Amino acid sequence: MDDVQAVQLGHLALSRYLRSQSPSATLGLSSDAVTLHASVLDTACLHILHFFTQRSTFVARTLVEHSRQIEELSLKIDSLIARTPSPADGPFEERYAEYIAAKHGKLTIFGLDLSEAPENWPLDAAYLSLDAAGGRTHDLPTLLPADHILAGRDRVLLRGVAGSGKTTLVQWLAVSTARKALDERLLYLYGLVPFVLPLRTLTRGGAKLPTPDGFLAAVDCPIASLQPTGWFDRVLRSKRGLILIDGIDEIPESERQEARRWLQELVSAYPHNRWLVTSRPSAVRQDWLIGDDFAELDLAPMSRENVAEFIRRWHKAAGIGDRYATDLLQAVRAKQDLGRLATNPLMCALICALHQDRRGYLPDGRKEVYDAALSMLLSRRDRERGIYKPGTIRIGEEHHIQLIQKLAYWMIRNGRSEMDRADAIELLEHALPAMPKIAEQGTAEEIYHHLLIRSGLLREPSAGSMDFIHRTFQDYLGAKAAVEGLDFDFLIAHAHLDQWEDVIRMSVAHARTMERTRLLTGLIERGDASEKDSRRLHLLAAACLEHATELNPDVRMEVEKRAAALIPPRSADQARALADVGPVVLDLLPGPQGLSDDEAYFTVLCATRLATDAAISVLAQYRDLSDLRVRSELARVWSRFECDRFAEEVIAHLGEEDLYFCVSNAQELHALRRFGGRSRIRITGTITPEEFQSACDRTRLTHLWVEADSDATWEWLAYFPNLHTITFESPLASIDVSSLKKVRSLRTIRLSEEAVFVGSEALPATTDIVRACLTTT
C-alpha cells in the first residue's frame, strides 16, 4: 500500500495488517514475547506514519485523494437524497414496501406440499439466480446474472420459455427493492419503488390498461386508496420507479399492439425510470421494443450447475434426505431424455416431486411427466394424507380433470390467463348436470371451492379471479379438452397464434394416431397455403414430432421435409425457433460445408440452445471454423454439456486467435490444462484464486476476463508472469485496482459496463488504463 492508504488505516490497523500478513514472524516466541512484539510493532507503525506525513509529497497526494473521495461521496449523497421520499410520502411508502415484501416474498414450489414441508417457500431460500444472454461485447457473447440486467440498463425486454423463471425474477427484484436489504450487486435498486404489473391481471375481464395513478388499484392492492394525492407522479418524476410488466404473452395477440402503445406512452411521460418487460420468445418479434431503447435479453437454459443446485435446494426445503437428491442428480446426468426436460425451474420441480413421490421411479417423456404430476396432485395427495372425512366432497381423479380442463379450455379460447370467479362458477354450473354423482355433493360454488383448495392446480391471485399455478398446466389440460371435443379444425385455424403453440403440441401428445395425422397434415397444408405464416406453422409441425409417439411414416417425412427447407437458420430469431422444435432438429442441421459465415453461426446458435449431449457431435463439425462468433459461442456454452467429452470433441480443437475460453469451474480449468492451457481465459463462474493458480497454466496466460467483486484484491495475479491484459466486467459503481500494482507484467486494463476505476494512480506509469465501454456491436 502507499503512504496515503497506510495513514488512512491508522497505526493500530496498520500493525494488525502487517501481523496478519506475516504470521510466522512470532513462531517459537513465548506468550510474553508475542505481546512485546505486538507492542513494539504498534509503536513502530506510529512513528512510520508520522514520518510519512512529514514528507513533501504527502500533502499534495492527500489533497488529490481527499478531493476524489469528497467528489465521490458528494455524488453518492446526491443520489441518496434524490431517492429519498418526501416526509409526506414516507409513511405510505413504508407501508407499501411491507405489502410488496409480504405479497411477493413467498414462492410456491411445485411438489413441496407432498411432504410435511410448508406450501410456500421463502423467496430468499427459493430464488436461484439464472443467467440472461443478449448483445455482444468485442465479438463475445454477453452472459450476465438475470437479477443484474437492470444494473447498467434502464429498459429491458426479457424473453424466456414457459417455466424459465421470468415471474420469479420479477418477484425477486420487487421484494429486494422493497426490503432495502440489498447486497452490493443490487445497490442500483436502492430507493426505488417497485410496481409489479402482471398484464393478465390488468386486462382481466377486458379491462382497459391503467394509467400510473391506477397501478395499485388495477392489481387489487388493498392500500391503493391510501396513496397520497399525486404520489405516483412524484415517484416517477424523481426517477424512482421500478416498473415490472410481466407477461406480454399472456394477453391475446390482438391486444398486444395496444399494450405496446400503452407502454410507449408511459415511457414517454416518465422516461428516466427502470423498466422490465417479460414475454415468451414467440409472443413478440425480434426488436419489438428496440425503437424505444429497450435492450432485448433471453433467459438462458439452466446449466448443469443450476440444475444440481435447484435439486439440492428442493430436497432441503422438502425435508428429504440427501440420498434422494444424489440419486436424482445421477439419473438426470445419466438419462439424456430426463436431462433434456430439466432445463427450467418448473420442470426441475416437477421431476423432483415425482422422483420423491414415486420412490425414485420417473417417467420418460414430457407428457408422461405431466400425467404423473396431475395424478399425484389430484388424487393421491389427499388420499395418502388422510384428508378425506365422512361428509366431505369426494371427486375422483378423472372427474377432477374433466372439470378443470373445461376451465382451462375456456381460458385458452378466450385468450386469457385469468378468469373471473363468477365465470368459473357459471361454467361449472353448465358442466355439473352431466356429472350427477358430483352435482349431488354440492352446488357449483362449493365444487369450485373444493377444486381451488384441493386440486393444487388452481389459485386465486386476487379477490374475484382465478388462474392456474402455471400456464403450462392450463395449456396441457386445455389441449386435452380440445382433443376430446374433436376440435381439430379449430386448433389448426389458431395454430399461427403464439398462445396456441404449446396447446397444439400437447394436443398431438393427447391425440390418437389418426387424429395426429389430421392435425399435422392440417398444419402442413395451411403452412403451404399461407406465405405469411408458412415458417411458423411448418416449424410448429416439426416441434410436434417430439410428442408423436406413433405416426404415419409418410406424414413424418412430409413434416421433416418442410422443416429441412427452413434450414440453415439465417437470424437469431430463426435459430431460436428451430431450437424450440427440440432435439429432432439436430438430425436436420447441416455441416459447415457450403454455408456462409452467418448461416454457420446461426446454426451453431441453434444447436447450443439444445442442451443435450446429442448436440456435441453436431457442434464438433464447426470446431475448425475461423469465424470468431462461432468459436466464441462454442467456448461460451461449455458448462451446458458433459465437461470432459465437450472438451475433447470441441474445446481442444478451437483456434485460439483472439478467443477467450470461458471457464465456470475448476474442472474446466484442469481440462484446459490437459490440452496445453490457453492464453486468453474468461471466468464465468465461482473460482477461488487458489483454484485458478493451481489449475491454470502459469506461463501461457496473457489475457484474463473476470467479473469483479467490490472487495476483491488482485495481487495474486502476480503469479502469472506474462499476464499483460485484464478486463473487468462488473455492474458495480467502482473497482479498486490498486492491488494490481504488484502485477508487474500488466500493461492494459479494460472495463466493461459503466464502472469507474479507484486506486488507479497507484499503478505503474507503464499501465495503459483503457476506459472502454464494451457495448453491443
Image (tube, rainbow, N blue to C red):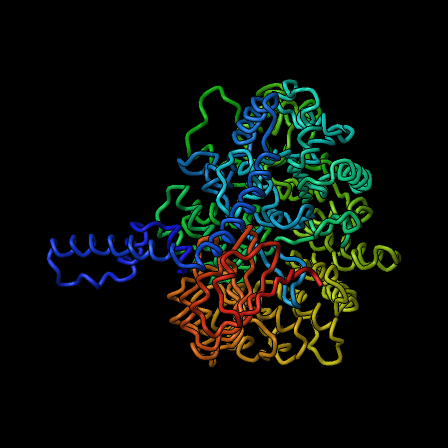
Is 612 on the left or on the right of 9, as rendered? right
| The N terminus, quarter of image | bottom left
| Residue at x-position 80% and y-position 44% | 490
Image position, residue 3 (x, y; %) = 40, 58
Image position, residue 315 (x, y; %) = 41, 46
Is 702 on the left or on the right of 319, as rendered? right
| Residue at x-position 60% and y-position 56% | 300
Along the line of sight, the residue nearer the viewer: 303 or 15: 15
Image position, residue 397 (x, y; %) = 55, 36
| Residue at x-position 79% and y-position 42% | 253
Above or below, 498 against 638 in this view is above
Image position, residue 273 (x, y; %) = 68, 39
Along the line of sight, the residue nearer the viewer: 489 or 741: 741
Q: Can you see residue 433?
A: no
| The C terminus, quarter of image | bottom right
Q: Can you see residue 11?
A: yes
**Image mark count:** 0
Above or below, 400 against 747 in this view is above
| Residue at x-position 63% and y-position 57% | 133
Along the line of sight, the residue nearer the viewer: 81 or 528: 81
Above or below, 428 against 651 in this view is above
